[in-house]
Image (cartoon, grey):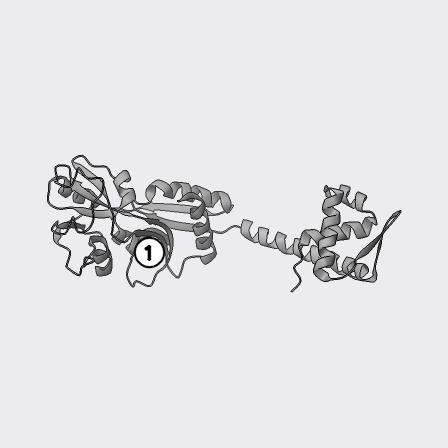
Amino acid sequence: MIDTDIRHIESFIAVAQELNITRAAARLHLTQQAVSTHIQQLERSMEVTLLVRTSRGVLLTPAGDELAAGGKTIVADLSELTERVRRTARQQAGSLRLACCPYATSLFAVEVADAMEAAVPGLSVELTSVRTPKQELELLNVGTADAAFMWLPVGEVGLHHAVIRTDSRAVALPLGHSLAGRDAVSLADLADEPVICPDVLISAESERHWIVDPRPDGTPAPRGPAAATIEDCLMMVARGRGIWLAPEPLSRWAPTPGVRWLPLTDAEPCELAVVWTPRAPESVVARLIAEIGKIIT
């Protein structure tokens, strides 16, 4: 396959029309050397001679005449295709209904929604904040949300997802805990600590993931009391009822008096994903994922 840059063909067509490299370079706002280099690269790529230089300019060879005739069509077709692609990207895209939870995603959801509406004129992004992943899943299932920001795993619920960020794990300890003075802890350090589990998870699989059950050595994770909300969970931690394992960003988004957050060195990381239903407009979801990639690190 011939490796040809469209810019080289554009330079050659200008030279073919002007029959002069100097005038072609001025027309293209390039240097003479740049235009000459483009021609030379075309000739090497095609293994032909396209023009010969004379004292008054250049003359095209038969091969040059053929490229000049066909090259115009290639450049015109590419220009037309580019405009169609841009026009498609600019066209009105309707609406996108996004669900998000406090702490985990709502702090960047507004920025994402604004970026989407700026990138896709005519698109309306509707944000709905709910308190738990269970409520996000309900909105997706009943069709009042097209997509949501959720921590994986979500279980076998017939949804699509794309990971948008990976975070390390942290543990919330009571401020007076014997481990609270450390810089970091491991799962072995927490082997006997009951893990509080917020009653907000959507599957047994996700619950096992969040409390790390079983532990790496195969032993079951000690289970602490259940909590109705994340806020209740943190209050239980502060009162010494157990510990809580969570994505590291929550340690910054949900500071709580009486709680000490520490990095957890050996737990599997957490994956934050865009989750969407088969009914969601795929082209808009694809653009959403692209815009998120520019914002979230």
- Percent position of residue 107, x then y: 34, 40
- Percent position of residue 273, x then y: 35, 53
What SS does tag 1 mark? helix
Task: Say how many tags the image has.
Answer: 1
Is 273 left or right of 84, judged from the image as shown?
A: left
Kind of residue at disc 1: Leu
Q: Residues within 10 Å of mark 1 (few under 14, many from 20)?
A: many
Asked if one can make out residue 115 in the rendered structure from this viewpoint, the answer is: yes
Asked if one can make out residue 146 in the rendered structure from this viewpoint, the answer is: no
Is 239 left or right of 158, judged from the image as shown?
A: left
Is 199 left or right of 144, judged from the image as shown?
A: left
From this viewpoint, which residue is outermost toward the right?
55
Q: Quadrant of the N terminus?
A: bottom right
Name the residue at 39% across, 61% down.
278
Please state which of residues 162 and 278 is positioned toward the viewer in this rendering. Answer: 162
Determine which residue is flagged by label 1.
140
Residue 130 higher or lower than 141, as above or below: above
- Percent position of residue 251, x then y: 25, 41
Is 126 left or right of 133, judged from the image as shown?
A: right
